[in-house]
Image (cartoon, grey):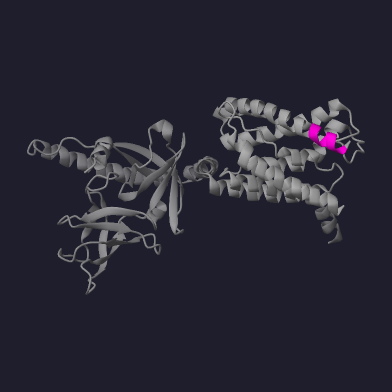
Amino acid sequence: MRQLINALLRYRNTLLFSGLLIISIIFLNHRSFYHQSIFSKTSLAISSNFNQLVRNASNYISLSNTNEKLFIENANLKAFELIHFANESSEKNQIKTFNFQVFEARIIKNSYNLARNYLIIDKGHSDGIEVDMGVITSDGIIGIVNQVTTNFSSVISILHRDLKINAGFKKNGAYGSLSWQGNHPNKMKLNDVSTLSRVAIGDTIVTGGMSDFFPRGIPIGKVFDFKKPELEGYYDIDVELFSNLTEKEFVYILKNINKDQLNQLKNEPR
Amino acid sequence: MSRDNLIVVFQFFLLLFLQSFLLNNINFFGFINPNLYLLLIVIHRLDSNPTILILLGFILGLLIDLLNQGSGGHTIATLTIAFLRPYIVKFSFGVNYDLPMGMVKGSPLSQRLIYISTIILVHHLLLYSVIYFRIDNTLTIIKNTLFTSFFTFVLIYTSLGLFKEKND
């Protein structure tokens, strides 16, 4: 104990300096957005490189499992392709252009037990990823890109308390905003759906076409429970997600090709 | 001793207000603001308690940042230079220095010049590295460091001359 106190006294200047230096770096971080963004970018780069090492090892172990999942997804896609070919001759007047370009990426870090969850994926600026692109998985949506470095990006998960996503009913197009309450990684809430429209348990919820991030009609989940408050004009709907966000490995990133035009329209003065 | 402390407190506030209300508005050539407040670190008694100097440097830098809406560069640079000062003293005056008022009397001119310029250069390099904080801006950092250091050096050396006349 005495030695410890002696050592502390001996190095008190260095300790004092380190303590005050940490305080001033925190001060710097709080005061300047520029430094804040550089700090967060650096920490993203460091943590993503580290996580990728760990992920690479665990990926190798689960290769056969992944293969199996990919086979299933391929089969599904093949089925869609066949349906598409089958219908092509009869529905020539259908929309031919698809406004989204698709990139694929691998998740290297995924969190789902915090109040505000983020993912890190292994594609970045050099692969054409930009901020505000939508991210989907094979069976649902997973988030929106919020920060990009050269080789990695971080994605706000839909399991994030401050994120709201435009979503609606598949059957009649009634729409509302989907948000996560922070309880269970499989349950979300759909608010702002007018009580004029009919709701039944088991209805499919899809993305609405009103956000720039996702195309219309990606299945998200189904109605699990709903309440009709007496004095309000809006339903309170519980949604159960189709996809299990806790065991995802591959994602697809959607780039909205017409986003510039949309932004131009939105920013036009009225 | 208490008279010395009073003088330090007086110098502290004088330099602080001089720096933030006058010198930081000079903008010579558009970007040069000499940092005279380093004078406090330079003329502080060489035999004083280093712990007190570290605290003094931290508070001085913090107040200058707060008064000028700075991001925090002055705090880090001044704190670090206050911490490094004993080593700079050893480096420039030799290991066996015994000059409590070394900056004012009793030391060769060349040693004093090395002492002042080391303090100023290290401080400015840290200050601008923190402010720009990118490898791409290395040239800007070096340019700013050299120019501002030169003007700070001139100012500090002139002020030291004033001190000397008074004391002699």
Please provide percent x and percent y for residue B75.
Answer: 65, 44
Drawn side of residue A27 relative to residue A15, left or right: left
**Residue nearer the viewer, A61 or A250:** A250
Q: Is residue B76 visible?
A: no
Please provide percent x and percent y for residue B15.
Answer: 70, 42
**Which picture quadrant has residue A259?**
top left
Residues in magenta, as a range: B161-167
Give the quarter of the figure containing the N terminus of chain A: bottom right
Residue in the picture at 16% in, 39% down = A84
| Residue furthest out toward the bottom | A230
Q: Is residue A188 visible?
A: yes
Please provide percent x and percent y for residue B115.
Answer: 80, 32
**Which picture quadrant has residue A182?**
bottom left
Residue A103, compared with residue B6, is above or below; it is above
**Residue nearer the viewer, A29 or A73:** A29
Drawn side of residue A53 relative to residue A96, left or right: right
Residue A135, compared with residue A244, is above or below; it is above
